Image (cartoon, rainbow, N blue to C red):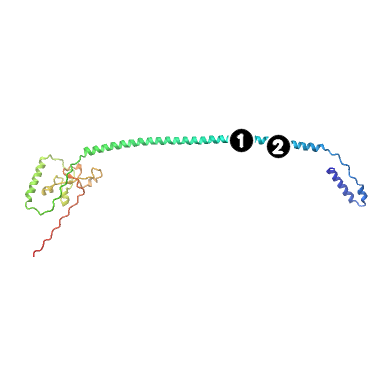
Amino acid sequence: MDPEQQRDLKARLMELTAKPGRGYNDAKNLQAPEPKPENHDAPATELQQEADSAVQRWRDREIRYQQIEAENEELKEANEDLSQRLNFTERYHNLGGREKKYQQIETENEKLKEKIGELNEACDAMQERLDLNIRYLRPEPIRHVEDPEPPQSAPVPNAFPLQQATTILLHQQAITVQPSPPPSRIVVCIGCYRRGLSCDTGSPCRECSKAGRVCKRAMCDSFKRVICRGGNCSQAHEVDGYDNVTYAGPVSKRKAPKKKAKKALA
């Protein structure tokens, strides 16, 4: 019995039970309608078609899955190939950059070597000119050993004849020796500097000639090393033209001797 027949039967029963005066016989005499012939071939055909379509869809999905798997494998192989090529390209790029940097450093190193060679040549030339200047333009002076200062003693009564003879001898030597050009500036000799006397450009000066002393002037050691103060220097230079010079070092002014107090006579 199909669902439509069942619905018709229920509706008929409802009508019979709802009418008054009807009893058990009416309900008994009620007969079920004849069932309609069912078409059993139609549902089977639809089910078969649905099953065939489901199988076909499953087969299509299986085929598509296999295709996707194959494409995935190809993509994996292509990815590995690209990764290897990328790594090789990066290594080659880094190697090329390092080679280029190495060449730049080599070029800069060659330039620096050439510049250092030029500076060394210029320095050697300047040293040669300086040596020639010191050797020919500034000849080495004759160094004399300074005589020790004589000890203080009482004045000799007959010292005047000796001083006069010394002065005459010095003048005779000055006449026999060829005169040299006068010095360019006045440098106080050691004796006048210690005694606070006025000095001149003579060699010997007037004060030393009168006293019969050896007239010497202190030689500037800084002038040869090119660190002298120039015009403010109080010592003799090689270009000044003084004959009797010595490397005396710092010359200090001598203090005057103290006078002894006379004892009172008893």
Q: Is residue 86 left or right of residue 168?
A: right
Indicate the quadrant containing the N terminus: top left, top right, bottom left or bottom right. top right
Checking the image for residue 58, the label placed there is: 2
Q: Say which element carries label 1.
A: helix
Indicate the quadrant containing the C terminus: top left, top right, bottom left or bottom right. bottom left
Checking the image for residue 73, the label placed there is: 1
* Residue displayed at 92% across by 51% down: 24
Residue 229 vs residue 82, the one in the foreground: 82
Lower position in the chain sequence, tag 1 or tag 2: 2
Report how far apart the C-alphas of labels 1 and 2 lie in the structure: 22 Å
* Residue displayed at 62% across by 35% down: 71
* Residue type at the position of mark 1: Glu
* Residue displayed at 17% across by 51% down: 194
Checking the image for residue 119, the label placed there is: none
The x and y percentages for residue 172 are: 9, 42
The x and y percentages for residue 48 are: 77, 36
Q: In this view, does 210 lie to the left or right of 28?
A: left
Number of other residues with Cα within 10 Å of mark 2, as a class: few under 14, some 14 to 19, many 20 or more: few
